[in-house]
Image: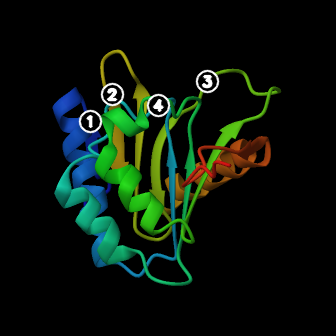
Amino acid sequence: MNDSNDGLIESRSEYQAALWRAFELIAESSAKEIWMCDADFADWPLNEPQVVEQLSRWAVSHRRCHVLALDYNLMPRRHPRWVQWRRHWSHVVSCWTPDETGNGRLPSLLYAPGVVSVRLVDRVHYRGRISTDVDDAVRIREELDGLFQRSVEAFPASTLGL
């Protein structure tokens, strides 16, 4: 992805292809962090065996995956492979949700510093961009920092019963 425009996203299939490509790039990289942000991750390919495998290749000690969602209720049904992967890698993955001061909306972003970002700006028409641009990365990181600062931990990797 050397093109200065990188990749414009203009459909749901292009959005999912961009996420697939980003997870491939992340698996091949030595990125220390991944930031994933979406209202509910409904359109993400997190249940695909290849995506879970790519995340497993990426996840080693001293790496962090930060996840932010409004609602995790459908994750176990929609993305059971990712939920199982997350249980195994709970020392790497932290899940968050906005606190009550949030406005009830989240951007749809996948970001690996120094590697790639995928941003969906229009959820209705699936318009967005996959990018390796440094300026995009700075803006995305600032946006994510602000969102995570106003968030609380959520979606525990396991629940303990009595």
Residue 13, percent from left and from top = 17, 33
Tell me which residue sits at (42%, 29%) in the image.
Answer: 74
Pointer 1 with pointer 2, Cβ within 8 A? yes
Tell me which residue sits at (37%, 61%) in the image.
Answer: 85
Q: CA distance from mark 1 to mark 2?
A: 5 Å
Q: What label does residue 127 carry, if any?
A: 2
Name the amino acid type tagged 3: Arg
The answer to whether residue 1 is visible is no
Q: How is the image coloured?
A: rainbow
Question: What residue sits right under mark 1 in the picture?
Answer: 9
Q: How many marks?
A: 4
Image height of 124 relative to 45, above or below: above
Residue 154, quarter of the rendered image: top right
Neighbours of disc 2 within 10 Å: few (<14), some (14-19), many (20+): some
Left or right, 140 with reference to 129: right
Tell me which residue sits at (18%, 59%) in the image.
Answer: 50
Image height of 78 relative to 155, above or below: above
Assign a secondary structure to mark 2: strand
Assign a secondary structure to mark 4: loop
Of the numbered discs 3 and 4, the one sitting upstream in the chain is 4
Q: CA distance from mark 4 to mark 1?
A: 20 Å
Question: What residue sits right under mark 4 in the picture?
Answer: 40
Question: What residue sits right under mark 3 in the picture?
Answer: 105
Tell me which residue sits at (52%, 34%) in the image.
Answer: 72
Pointer 3 with pointer 4, Cβ within 8 A? no
Of the numbered discs 2 and 4, the one sitting upstream in the chain is 4
Of the numbered discs 3 and 2, the one sitting upstream in the chain is 3
Left or right, 150 with reference to 66: right
**Can you tell which of label 3 and label 2 is closer to the viewer?**
3
Of the numbered discs 3 and 1, the one sitting upstream in the chain is 1
Name the amino acid type tagged 1: Ile
Q: CA distance from mark 3 to mark 4?
A: 11 Å
